[in-house]
Amino acid sequence: MDNSKLIGYSPIGIAHSRFTEMKNTPVQGAFAPQATGEIEVFEEYRDGLKDLDTFTHIILLYHFHLSQGYDLVSEPQIEDDPHGVFSMRVNRRPNAIGFSVVKLDRIDGNILHVSEFDILDGTPILDIKPFVNMMDNRPDASNGWVKPPHMEDIQNETSKRASGN
């Protein structure tokens, strides 16, 4: 790879949760309202949290720190048909960047208490953005290949993982 194309980021915080292994982490936080965690924002970025508490949901961008390598085509957890990496939300990606929309329950100093959480403990947080329903919701968006029964499979798997079963 041409080093002139490399981009670097420094974390602004770290995720804390009871999820220590991918196999026990909810597949999607939207289906796991009982899954909670904390985002510790590093002290030097604390002032950036001003007014974040006026939002009910936030978008977390993070680094899949335990992911190794990637496959451009693979089978998702919910189906046996292979799909391209860019049509799936998997952690094994060319750039190990993840995102989650989580519910912001409250902020205590530099600690964000969140639910609908699907992030491993110790995950480096790269950025936080507010979820703005009128800009981030697209009612006419297609769900692509992820349709029932796949959505039901995701919900069932997420509920099982979030409850610790």
Image (tube, rainbow, N blue to C red):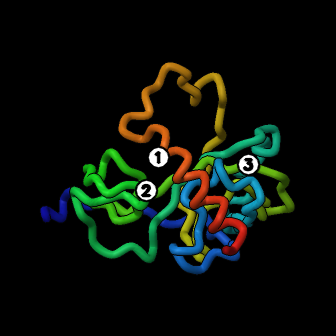
Give percent across and percent down for residue 20. Answer: 60, 80
Residue corresponding to mark 3: 103
Q: Which of marks 3 and 2 is nearer the N terminus?
A: 2
Q: Residue 150 carries which label?
A: 1
Specify whether 85 is left or right of 159: left
Q: Residue at x 58, y 27 (%)?
A: 137
Residue 136 point in image, percent of width and height: 57, 30
Mark 3 or mark 1, which is nearer the start of the sequence?
3
* Mark 3 to mark 2 CA distance (whole Å): 24 Å
Mark 1: few, some, or many residues within 10 Å (few <14, many ≥20)?
some
User: Residue 13: where, in percent of width, then height?
Assistant: 62, 66
Q: How crowded is mark 3: few (under 14 residues within 10 Å), some or many (20 or more)?
A: many
Instruction: Determine which of the numbered discs, if any, sits on residue 78 in the image.
Output: 2
Which residue type carries mark 2?
Answer: Ile
- Element class at badge 3: strand
Instruction: Please tell me whether residue 36 is drawn above or below residue 49 in the rendered image.
Output: below
1 and 2 marks in contact (CB < 8 Å): yes
User: Which residue: 46% across, 65% down?
Assistant: 63
Instruction: Check the image and report above or below for 106 versus 96.
Output: above
- Viewer-nearest of labels 3 and 2? 2
Examine the rendering and report whether any part of residue 62 can be seen. Answer: yes
Farthest residue to the left: give it: 2
Determine whether 140 is above or below 152 in the image. Answer: above
